[in-house]
Image (cartoon, rainbow, N blue to C red):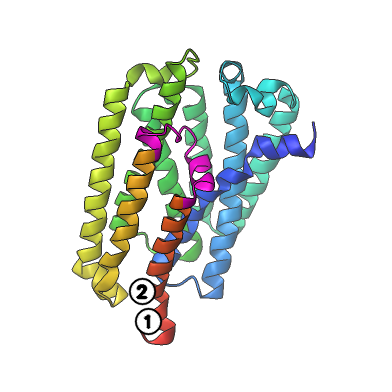
Amino acid sequence: MTGRHILRLIRPEHWVKNLFVFIPAFFAARLTEWPVLKGALLGFFSFSLVASAVYVLNDLVDAAQDRNHPDKRLRPIASGAVSTRQAIATLVIFLGAGTLIAAFLSRDMLIFSLLYFIINVFYSFSLKHIALVDISLIGFGFLLRVFAGGAVTGVDVSQWLIVMTFLLALILGLAKRRGEYVVATGGHNFRKALEGYNLPFLDVSITVCSTVAIVAYLMYCFSPEVTSRIGSHQIFYTAFFVILGILRYLQLTLVFDRTESPTRALLRDGFLQIVLLGWIGAFAWLLYGRKFLGF
């Protein structure tokens, strides 16, 4: 076992998902406050350690199936580069470190972190084999990240944030299952939950969730509560980035079959990255430009 194998085992590239911890403070325009930013940074690091423990657990449980997958067979445990004993030790270290930091931050942060791990234990051993339940738990995992962000920063999580986070997570989960289904129908059947899906159902579900997500975001943009809190009626301009981002993701999913790994799709697709940066920049201007520059 080498450091390179450990890095592949804990999947640090997937820590990008834990940036959802920053979302409550970002939307509350409080990321410029050092105590809030420090709490979000520590929360992100804590949740990332716990998430890595979950990735190790998942690889341990799926090792036999991963050996039948064209890409996952190269994972450290499935390939034999990391032994079961070494993987368990890594899991314990990362889970212990993550929960210790969470306990230091707040009781709620500890609860959300442990809940995330416990849910993923059940997910890894059984629930991921049940169609719809599997993607629902993926969505709940993203919600726990947001709730954790609220807990470590003292920022309330709005109903809009809850709904849109869950919808986005469903889109990512369905797109991931679609990618896996395409691989499975090519002769590499490796996930039992795929028996509850087919391409027409997945395509319709992704389209429905994407449509609802766009409508929900537009309702958010024109909500009097939101425009009053932000102090601007120009928030609807950010919807252009959201619509373009969702359309691009649908293109990657339905046309190019590149979303079996949503994280990889984001990290490798320049169009998505530009749209995401544009959305963040536009929102940052509305939230923080007025606050510091008077615009």
Q: Residue furthest right?
A: 2
Q: Is residue 138 left or right of residue 199?
A: right
Q: Judge whether residue 92 can be spotted in this image.
A: no
Give the amino acid at mark 1.
Arg
Q: Which residue type does callout 2 highlight? A: Leu
**x and y percentages locating residue 150 in the rendered image:** 44, 60
Quadrant location of residue 104?
Answer: bottom right
Residue at x 45% of width, y 72% of height: 30
For mark 1, what is the residue? 290
Q: Say which quarter of the image contains residue 208.
A: top left
Q: Which mark is residue 286?
A: 2
- List x then y, in percent, for residue 235: 28, 68
Residue 69 visible somewhere in the drawing: yes
Q: Secondary structure at mark 2?
A: helix
Q: Tell me: residue 13, above or below residue 31.
A: above
**Residue 260 colored magenta?**
yes
Residue at 51%, 35% (x, y): give it.
118
| Left or right: where 34 falls relative to 195 | right
Q: Are marks 2 and 1 in contact (CB under 8 Å)?
A: yes
- Residue 77 rendering spot, x and y as whole percentages: 68, 25
**Which quadrant would the N terminus be assigned to in this image?**
top right
Q: Which residues are magenta?
A: 252-270
Residue that appears at 47% across and 32% down: 260
- Could you say where residue 278 lies in the image, as x and y percent from the top left? 42, 63
In the image shown, does 161 or 75 lie closer to the viewer? 75
Question: With 123 as the anchor, is 246 left or right in this view?
Answer: left
